[in-house]
Image (cartoon, rainbow, N blue to C red):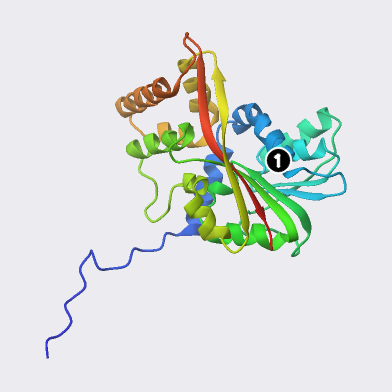
Amino acid sequence: MVPDAAPTSQSLPAARPDLDALKARQRGTWSSGDYAVVGSTLQIVGETLCETLDLRSHQRVLDVAAGNGNASLAAARRWCEVVASDYVPALLARAQARAEADGLAITCREADAEALPFPEASFDVVVSTFGVMFTPDPERAAAELLRVCRRGGRIGLANWTPEGFVGQLFRTIGAHVPPPAGVGSPALWGTPERLNALFGPHAIAAVPRHYVFRYRSPAHWLAVFRTCYGPVLKAFAALEPERQAALAQDLLDLVGRFNRSGDASMVVPGEYLEVVVTRL
């Protein structure tokens, strides 16, 4: 009888990443810089999503991974009862300040997208714009979105796609600062395959859209993202000066491939998938 061969490194199952450690690292990333500077430019995405969802004034809406509140404010402008949730308190404070400045009513609640502190079926609509897609455990996050949404309710998402500008931005960063092993790209949330895997038993409608990044110049965009956008800020911080220069050049080259301004400014379409899941 021939004994079983000893397992090789190729046959061993991949080690499951430490999701708690990864989440703590992500919280530090999104707490760094000043995401609200970038986030506030994305307001149109929240408005468009709320129009697609055809929100009504009597509906109770939860914004998950709300950041500085784009979708929350859009829903509040439609007289909904809105709860904005995020695990970065400083971003929620910015959302609250924006709501007060506009005379809008929202409730802010610190919360982990993978363990939402709300009862089952407590919301008519659950939304997330470029937020929940960054959770380290997509299955758990999707299950939470479904759990807190009532039957017949809807989940509205805006997710960057892998081939769009932001998906390629993360691919470029990953070539310089490799992501944690065993964790898929957040841009997979912008693919039908991942959506079907996460929400398959429920009705899914997805439409490609574009948010256009408009900056004074590619250099201006890089300066803003390097200072304010946590993932880019952290990537540069992890590199030695000469490698920082290489990353900067690769990012400017990326902008050059997408830029359609025709002048010295930056006008870059960023593809995302607008998703509506109807909970059955």
Classify 181 as above or below 71: below
Query: Where is residue 139, by image quadrant?
Result: bottom right
Classify 175 as above or below 10: above
Q: Report the number of numbered marks.
A: 1
Q: In this view, which residue lies farthest toward the bottom?
A: 1
Q: Nearer the viewer, residue 194 or 19?
A: 194
Within-10-Å neighbours for mark 1: few <14, some 14–19, many 20+: few
Query: Where is residue 56, by image quadrant?
Result: top right
- The quadrant of the picture occupied by the N terminus is bottom left
Residue 36 in picture, x, y percent from top left: 64, 31
Q: Which residue is mark 1?
A: 52
Kind of residue indicated by mark 1: Thr
Residue sitting at 50 percent across and 23 percent down?
Answer: 268
Residue 113 in picture, x, y percent from top left: 63, 54
Q: In this view, which residue lies farthest toward the top?
A: 263
Residue 32 in picture, x, y percent from top left: 55, 36
Query: On the picture, is 227 further left or further right than 127?
Result: left
Q: Secondary structure at mark 1?
A: helix
Residue sitting at 52 percent across and 48 percent down?
Answer: 189
Query: On the picture, is 97 further left or further right than 168?
Result: right
Residue 69 visible, this orientation: no
Residue 100 visible, this orientation: yes
Q: Nearer the viewer, residue 51 or 140?
A: 51
Residue sitting at 15 percent across and 85 percent down?
Answer: 3
- The quadrant of the picture occupied by the C terminus is bottom right
Q: Nearer the viewer, residue 159 or 98?
A: 159
